[in-house]
């Protein structure tokens, strides 16, 4: 007599046959390996760009105009096959164009990569990732909670080229910020620029306000960059240069119309960032405004990859550095006493909080 039994291979039950489900290898599409390759190629992409800058390819092509690898090789005294390989890689990065073997600058290269481009990043690219060696030891940094060579070990060596490299972008941002902040409408404004670098913010405000003055702070050894840049822009005579640690340098209370914390909070850790915000609050006069520029991560730390990678860059290269969310900054600003918080983006990817120290209450003005 027939006895129903379980089939020996349950996966071959009627509902699981190929006729119903299709072949497994055509049914199931594996995820692409593209994100893995993108990560692997990330290293090569960066060093291709760095080599192109070091070999002066962009400036040379700007001078020669469209050029073959042979002619460029003659011009720069470089072996043709190696040069062509590098040029093709730069084309793959979409930072040069090539047609019938002739290479030329594209719009991105003209704007960002030639040394006199209107928004040149040529000097920034070598220093932007922080000390390169730290990246090769990132797992150790995560294990130990601190990088092997934090930039704090020699801040002058790191920050001088960094702030020279970021000046063009930050100055453009600070100048455009007037459209949102209207600092140009201030009369005799007093500006405090903490960790000023080349002082792009102080210079932008002083350019717009011919009766303004600024106190410009940075570490001794870096503040010289601010001295040079303010002199170049003809505003040095309205600046007082105050070298020292921005956590402890002496500051007047209730004094400034504008305090700038431009890309300084993200190296300081949460406590350090809050301390700088509190110092800014005390230094501002009532109704004075803080401008706090940084790269902010979104609340879930995943929707703005640029800020997330900047946070990893801080982790890889500094003792306490991480980027913080808009929400964290909003809470810290509010806790310090600021009101009327706004977030502005004067140029793409450059956001700043603008926050106001509240006016004195009438009671506070009353002489008791
Ligand atoms: C990323 S740069 C920003 C420069 C400029 N504020 C800007 O927005 O372009 C950070 C600056 O903070 C300065 N800095 C870092 N630690 C500091 C400290 N403890 N006291 C004063 N300045 C400091 C660095 O020297 C550097 O110039």
Image: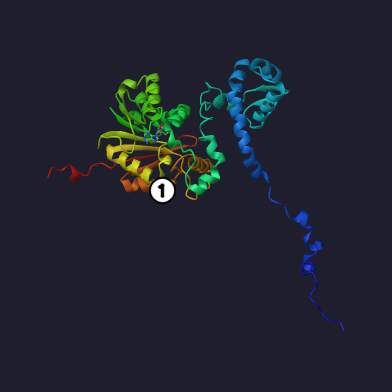
Residue 41 relative to residue 336: left or right: right
Asked if one can make out residue 155 in the rendered structure from this viewpoint, the answer is yes
Which residue sits furthest right?
1
Viewer-nearest residue: 258 or 246: 246
Q: Quadrant of residue 204?
A: top left
Q: Residue at x 60, y 16 (%)?
A: 63
Residue lying furthest left: 368
Residue topped by disc 1: 328
Quadrant for the C terminus in the image: top left
The quadrant where residue 284 appears: top left
Q: Residue at x 32, y 44 (%)?
A: 338
- Check the image and report above or below for 83 versus 320: above
Which residue is more in the foreground, 228 or 187? 228
Label 1's element? helix
Mark 1: few, some, or many residues within 10 Å (few <14, many ≥20)?
Answer: some
Quick one: 113 or 334, which is closer to the camera? 113
Horizontal and vertical percent for residue 289? 32, 37
Q: How far across and down, in percent of the image, does residue 329 sit?
A: 40, 45
Quadrant showing the N terminus: bottom right
Give the color scheme: rainbow, by chain, secondary structure or one colour: rainbow
Q: Ligand 1 appears in which quadrant?
A: top left
What is the number of callouts on the image?
1
- Classify 217 as above or below 232: below
Place of residue 17 in the rendered image (x, y in percent of width and height, measured from the top left): 80, 64
User: Is the distance from the Cβ of mark 1 to the nearest ligand 1 atom less than 8 Å?
Assistant: no
Position of 217 compared to 92: left or right?
A: left
* Residue 172 seen in render: no
The residue positioned farthest toward the bottom in the image shown? 1
In the image, what residue occupies the spot 33% across and 39% down? 247
Q: Position of residue 320 (x, y in %)?
A: 43, 43
């Amino acid at each position: 007599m027939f006895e129903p039994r379980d089939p020996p291979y349950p996966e071959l039950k009627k509902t699981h046959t190929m006729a119903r489900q299709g072949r497994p290898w055509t049914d199931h599409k594996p995820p692409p390996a593209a994100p893995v390759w993108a990560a692997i190629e990330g290293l090569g992409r960066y060093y291709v760009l760095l080599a192109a800058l070091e070999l002066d390819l962009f400036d040379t092509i700007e001078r020669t105009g469209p050029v073959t690898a042979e002619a460029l090789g003659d011009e720069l005294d470089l072996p043709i096959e190696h040069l062509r390989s590098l040029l093709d890689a730069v084309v793959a990065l979409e930072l040069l164009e090539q047609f019938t073997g002739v290479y030329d600058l594209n719009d991105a290269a003209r704007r960002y990569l030639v040394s006199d481009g209107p928004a040149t990043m040529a000097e920034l690219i070598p220093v932007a990732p922080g000390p390169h060696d730290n990246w090769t030891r990132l797992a150790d940094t995560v294990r130990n909670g601190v990088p092997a060579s934090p930039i704090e070990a020699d801040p002058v060596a790191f920050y001088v080229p960094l702030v020279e490299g970021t000046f063009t972008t930050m100055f453009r941002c600070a100048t455009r910020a007037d459209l949102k902040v209207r600092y140009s409408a201030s009369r005799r404004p007093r500006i405090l620029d903490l960790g000023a670098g080349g002082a792009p913010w102080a210079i932008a405000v002083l350019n717009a306000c011919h009766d303004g003055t600024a106190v410009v702070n940075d570490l001794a050894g870096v503040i010289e960059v601010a001295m040079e840049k303010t002199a170049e822009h003809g505003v040095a005579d309205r600046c007082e240069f105050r070298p020292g640690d921005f956590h402890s340098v002496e500051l007047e209370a209730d004094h400034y119309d504008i305090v700038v914390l431009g890309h300084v909070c993200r190296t300081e850790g949460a406590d350090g960032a809050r301390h700088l915000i509190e110092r800014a609050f005390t230094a501002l006069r009532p109704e004075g405004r803080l401008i706090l520029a940084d790269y902010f991560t979104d609340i879930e730390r995943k929707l703005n990859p640029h800020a997330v990678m900047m946070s990893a860059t801080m982790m890889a290269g500094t003792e306490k550095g991480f980027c913080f969310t808009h929400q964290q900054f909003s809470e810290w600003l509010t806790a310090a006493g600021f009101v009327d918080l706004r977030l502005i983006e004067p140029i793409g990817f450059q956001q700043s909080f603008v926050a106001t120290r509240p006016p004195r209450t009438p009671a506070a003005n009353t002489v008791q």
